[in-house]
Image: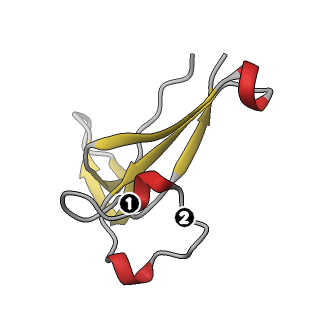
Amino acid sequence: MAKAILGIKRGMTQIFDDEGNMVPVTVIESQPSVVVQKKTVETDGYLALQLGFGEVKERRLTPAAPRAFRPGEGNPPALPARGAGG
């Protein structure tokens, strides 16, 4: 299974290694993710998870948004991202 970081790119910066060489690096803001939907081989023909990241205002949701994004406690996740399972 692949490992990944789900986050938002916040910018670029630089660090210096032990020999004094400049190394460009990307700054990523990472927050906890929540599983909002699970796809199974039996029901959907493939295996995957849909993760939510961040928050979105309720009025910005479309009618097609999954039930997991609908009103509940707090704001629903903003950025759905799917990851295939093996």
- Tell me if residue 13 comes above or below residue 61 in the rendering: above
Q: How many marks?
A: 2
CB under 8 Å between callouts 1 and 2? Answer: no
**Dot 1: few (<14), some (14–19), or many (≥20) neighbours within 10 Å?**
some
- Tell me if residue 85 comes above or below residue 11 in the rendering: above
Q: Secondary structure at mark 2?
A: loop
- In the drawing, does residue 15 fall left or right of residue 36? left
- If you read the primary sequence from the N terminus, does the residue marked by circle 1 or circle 2 appear first? 1
Q: Quadrant of residue 49?
A: top right
Q: Position of residue 57 (x, y in %)?
A: 32, 77
Q: Which is more toward the observer, 8 or 23?
A: 8
Dot label at residue 25: none
Q: Looking at numbered disc 1 in the image, what kind of residue is underneath it?
A: Ile
Q: Which residue is mark 2?
A: 65
Q: Which is more toward the observer, 20 or 5?
A: 5
Q: Position of residue 85 (x, y in %)?
A: 63, 22
Q: Residue furthest right?
A: 45
Q: Looking at numbered disc 2 in the image, what kind of residue is underneath it?
A: Ala
Q: Secondary structure at mark 1?
A: strand
Residue at x-position 38% and y-position 83%: 59
- In the drawing, does residue 66 fall left or right of residue 15? right
Q: Which residue is mark 1?
A: 8
Residue at x-position 45% and y-position 60%: 79
- Tell me if residue 60 comes above or below residue 6 in the rendering: below
Between the residue at mark 1 and the residue at mark 2, the CA separation in whole angstroms equals 21 Å
